[in-house]
Image (cartoon, rainbow, N blue to C red):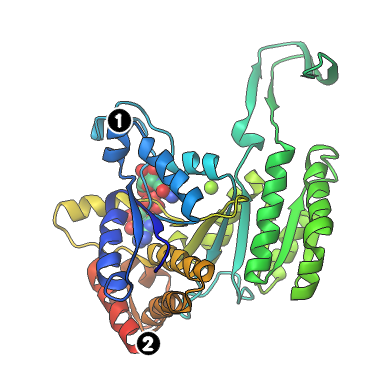
Amino acid sequence: MTTPLVEMDGDEMTRILWQMIKDELITPYVDLKTEYYDLGLKNRNDSDDQVTVDSANATLKYGVAVKCATITPNQARMSEYDLKEMWKSPNGTIRAILDGTVFRAPILVKGIVPYVKNWTKPITIARHAYGDVYKNVEIKVPGPGKAELVFTGADGKEIRETIHEFDGEGILQGIHNTKASISSFARACFQYATDTKQDLWFSTKDTISKKYDHTFKDIFQEIYENEYKEKFEKLGIEYFYTLIDDAVARVIRSEGGFIWACKNYDGDVMSDMVATAYGDLSMMTSVLVSPKGVYEYEAAHGTVQRHYYKHLKGEETSTNSIATIFAWTGALKKRGELDGNAALTDFASKLEKACIKTVEDGKMTKSLSLISTCKDPVILNSQDFIKAIRETLDTLL
Ligand code: NAP
Ligand code: MG
């Protein structure tokens, strides 16, 4: 390796897996260079969360990060870790600095059959990660009255629309988005489509929302025509816009193999549907693609707290490490690509193949055996599963 990866360590069971993965699957084969940031909750608390900010800034500097799952503190964690503050979600903090779009795709293996039987290729969901209902303002309307939408320009000029004349109790919600954020969402999607040579679908409810959703559609179209049309045509890939209702119907009938860009809420809901249909979150890859040209790879699942408590009690766990391994391989591959280091990219691809082959050969964790059609799976504990992947890897190298 020439350029270091930004390594963001995390919490609980995934932190245990993190070390095992490095020891068994990475450092014996790769002259690993990383700049290490400990995003474990204790260190976030000790550093007043500065470590999270530093790790995101390091990602802007080096270009590629790999992140372990981390605890987002809630009330229970306040006392468990004796926290000074209820620190924000690290993913939220990192996203705010890098800005960007999260792409999630299933990892397909034989024996784990999608519920939708014609989905033979992965469907990648690209979720806009800013605004709309996630940054809303809400009012519970107590009784009769008039609700208005008012914008006061910096020059003092007003735009005013009546929302509704209430004759009784009701509810109100104000949402927004910005041209800058929608544009960077669009660019991230077009860029990822060209990087991975897949068609890009985008869907909104523009027939009903003639200004809000329609603006998303217009911005995508404009950026496509001005910046990406030629590249798409050269690669033989397609940009396709359709109404969300139509998209849902087409997605179900499709064979997969494309990127589906979704507004924030649609992406939240649809990514859970797609993940469940393909297996579960432990068989998903997840990458944050920033319009600043940097990448952060992670697993789509959390810290697997329940397994960690079993581990602490000395009980055996059977936690699936594949999504975390794919975070590492995604980052190593991208690093190899950016540095022209073919040996690194090749190693990462072989490690991915080793994961898939190990499961297809019938060796898997408990959670995988529950969704696999494999007749007599060999159920391995967390450590032995990683060791089995190493054995497969050795045969591939
Ligand atoms: P979780 O860690 O995803 O685990 C929920 C359940 O899903 C587990 O108890 C386990 O089910 C199953 N599971 C998830 N990943 C698995 C794997 N790799 N192998 C086997 N089974 C797996 O979600 P959570 O328990 O709701 O959250 C725990 C912590 O993670 C929270 O503090 C949350 O803040 C954090 N979190 C972090 C991220 C992130 O950093 N990206 C994302 C989500 C949540 P069984 O117990 O039935 O085996
Ligand atoms: Mg969700």
Q: Position of residue 177 (x, y in %)?
A: 70, 36
Q: Quadrant of the N terminus?
A: bottom left
Q: Position of residue 132 (x, y in %)?
A: 66, 36
Question: Secondary structure beneath disc 2?
Answer: helix
User: Does residue 127 appear to the left or right of 12 in the view shown?
Assistant: right
Mark 2 crowdedness (10 Å alpha carbons): few <14, some 14-19, many ≥20: few
Most extreme residue toward the left is: 314
Q: Between disc 2 and disc 1, whose residue precedes?
A: 1
Q: Quadrant of the C terminus?
A: bottom left
- Ligand 1 has an atom within 8 Å of the beta carbon of the residue at disc 2: no
Q: Camera-side residue: 218 or 332?
A: 332
Question: Secondary structure beneath disc 1?
Answer: helix
Residue, disc 1? 78
Disc 2 marks a residue whose amino acid type is Leu
Indicate which disc residue 335 carries: none
Q: Camera-side residue: 172 or 213?
A: 213
